[in-house]
Amino acid sequence: MPARFRQQRLLIVGCGDIGLRLARRVPGRVLALTSSPDRRPELRRRGIVPLVGNLDDPRSLARLAGLAQRVVHLAPPASDPGGGDGRDLRTRALLRALHRRSPPAGLVYASTSGVYGDCGGALVRETRPLAPATARARRRVDAERLVRRFGRIAGTRASLLRVPGIYAADRPGGTPRERLLRGTPVLRPEDDVYTNHIHADDLARALAAALWRGRPQRACHASDDSALRMGDYYDLAADLYGLPRPPRVSRELARQQLPPALLSFMGESRRLDNQRLKTELRVRLRHPTVASGLRG
């Protein structure tokens, strides 16, 4: 990174697995907001300054004002915010706190590719109109709108990364192995959907690049080069792991056998174009395909 970034403070909001990977890749002082006091020793061991606060309690966020020049917002919206009106109350609370004094020069928000809804397998660019079909995706759209508005009002260079499925062998639940061992079915080819992926390390590198290369108020797909249907992804993983391929079922049968949360990921099909990731953020993927990442 340029020398001027090496002495700046970075605040990571939602410092789970991806936040920890990001912290290893950025110079300067890294701070992390955590709602769990028990995580403070772990964060300190990793060279991260822990700050105890809860996005669901706006009063606990007052100390964030003017604290860091760069912010990466990785925290998801609450799963059941009051009223179910599609608002992301956590992002609202965070941005109010950051705006109280000396807003950050840069802000990166990790959103989701679910903001597009079902695209029928079409190739999707960042300019496609948003059509969220689930409550969680509608809250992500609200968060994106808030972040962009904050960038314009506060003079902050706000960037959005729309993230698909994250995987990595060293990430909890980060590979299809457990699902394959359970024998969970996937859709038959004629009913199957396209799915998109990004290796956890490549996502951390994309976030770091967006901190100083992201264009103001602009979205970018943090996705690899794979163009696989979901069933083909699980077949590939099964072959790599030496496990049986999952059974294929019709969509009607899947509705009878699978929980709603899992079915929701089988109801949307799209292929993410990642040219902005490569040309604007200049990210060279270490794992350009899931075959490469799963082997690694």
Image (spheres, grey):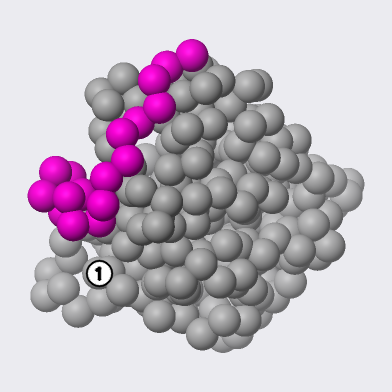
Relative side of 54 to 27, left or right: left
Type of amino acid at the residue the image marks with label 1: Ala
Q: Measured from the top left, where is residue 12 in percent x and y?
A: 52, 47
| Quarter of the figure with residue 152 | bottom right
| Front in this rendered view, residue 260 or 241 | 241
Relative side of 135 to 194, left or right: left
The answer, for residue 258, to whether it is visible in the render is yes
| Residue at the extreme top | 242
| Front in this rendered view, residue 191 or 182 | 191
Q: Looking at the image, is 34 positioned above or below residue 239?
A: below
Q: Residue at x 67, y 64 (%)?
A: 273
Q: Residue at x 57, y 62 (%)?
A: 271
Q: Which residues are magenta?
A: 242-261
Numbered disc 1: secondary structure: helix
Q: Measured from the top left, where is residue 83 in percent x and y?
A: 11, 75
Q: Looking at the image, is 280 positioned above or below residue 133?
A: above
Q: Looking at the image, is 215 positioned above or below residue 74?
A: below
Q: Looking at the image, is 59 positioned above or below residue 242?
A: below
Relative side of 125 to 37, left or right: right
Q: Mark 1 highlights which residue?
A: 135
Asked if residue 260 lies in the magenta stretch, the reply is yes
Q: Measured from the top left, where is residue 239 in percent x and y?
A: 52, 22
Q: Measured from the top left, where is residue 86 in percent x and y?
A: 26, 76
The total number of labels drawn is 1
